[in-house]
Image (cartoon, grey):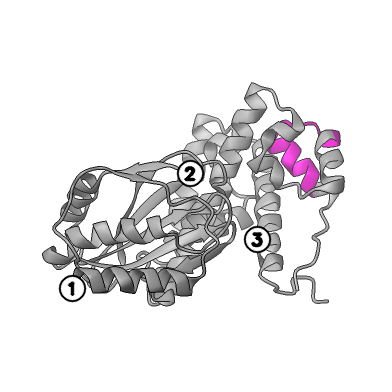
Amino acid sequence: MCQILDLEETSEEKVKKVIGEKGLRAFINTLDDLGIEPQEIERIKALKEVIDAKEKEILNLEGVDVDGN
Amino acid sequence: MATKQAYTDSFFRSLNKLTGIPMSRIKDYAKENNPFNILEHPMVVEPNERQLEKIGKLKEFISSYNVLKMNQENEKIKFSSPKDAGSYFTSLLNGMKDKERILVAFLDNSNSIIETKTISEGTTNMSVVYPRDILKMALANDCSNLIMAHNHPGGTTNPSKEDIKLTQRIVNIFKPLDINVIDHIIVGGYSFSSMAENGTLPSKSMDLANYNPINFTGAQEQSETYETQKEALSIEDDLEM
């Protein structure tokens, strides 16, 4: 994941620590206190958006009504 | 029923940030196609080398994301049904359309995963399996049971005769050691089938253990029904008994 995000070495360490403590999903949902560069946070948010879209697509393929229609 | 998913500008911007592919090119492609196809067939957006590498990494991450989540939610992943095993292996194999990968999950006596290993990775329709290596891994993990899984790059989930033969070869090796092959999951796209559930899983050792490498062509598209497969299996059983 860190390779996709092009994180600085110090940021990578912080990210790994938080994921180890909180778990991946919680990490993605709480980025503000990480203390890493704003552009790195933007890339993590971008990754979250792509993951969410993928999850939605899979649910959609499985016939789950994800939009409440 | 599945409906066509709408993708937002924000989503396209995110793909652009992560891969470096210009947003206009992503949006153009997405007008007529699912934008996630870019991860499977990156050449459709004519990436440069760096972009191609980033697309590959993103594809790999998305494929393994569900398993990472499962790993963190439960320290141990336990299989209670073919559906559990199917979901797990689908998460690992659903992105593989260009090659075949064979995995084995080594399980303890409560069917919790001790370790999952890739035992072979081939082309779209050919892999070589080394039974001796699987045996070494099983013994190193001190496992009680194991589940095999592989993907059919073509997308079908019907077990082929080759799939059944491969499973039988592995059963022949492990059954005498009291290690049970409890399922063989076949993943095609986002679907899977379970040989245990379909009744096509060999359960008995039918021959002496043969440790020679297996040239496996299980990914060939098969149109036979389960009934035909089961029939073939029972004929083989009759001949051997």
Residue B19's spot in the image, x, y percent? 68, 34
Q: Quadrant of the N terminus of chain B?
A: bottom right
Q: Which residue is mark 3?
A: A55
Question: Mark 2 belongs to which amino acid?
Answer: Asn
From the image, state whether disc 3 or disc 1 is nearer to you. 1
Q: Are marks 2 and 1 in contact (CB under 8 Å)?
A: no
Q: In the image, are marks 2 and 1 on the same chain?
A: yes
Say which residue appears at 64% left-offset and 29% top-offset: B52
Q: Is residue B24 left or right of residue B120?
A: right
Main structural element of the magenta stretch: helix, strand or loop?
helix
Question: Mark 1 belongs to which amino acid?
Answer: Met
Q: CA distance from mark 3 to mark 2?
A: 28 Å
As helix, strand or loop, the secondary structure at mark 3 comes to helix
Q: Is residue B22 magenta?
A: yes
Say which residue appears at 23% left-offset and 69% top-offset: B239
Residue B28's spot in the image, x, y percent? 86, 39
Query: Quick one: B1 or B196, which is closer to the camera?
Result: B196
Is B166 located above or below residue A10 in the figure?
below
Q: Which residue is mark 2?
A: B125
Residue A13's spot in the image, x, y percent? 46, 38
The part of the chain drawn in magenta is B11-24
Q: CA distance from mark 2 to mark 1?
A: 32 Å
Is B222 located above or below residue A7 in the figure?
below
Q: Is residue B119 left or right of residue B51?
A: left
Query: Quick one: A32 or B113, which is closer to the camera?
Result: B113
Circle on res. B241: 1
Q: Is residue B107 left or right of residue B64?
A: left
Q: Is residue B63 visible?
A: yes
Q: In the image, are marks 3 and 1 on the same chain?
A: no
Question: Mark 3 belongs to which amino acid?
Answer: Glu
From the image, state whether disc 3 or disc 2 is nearer to you. 2
Q: Chain of mark 2?
A: B
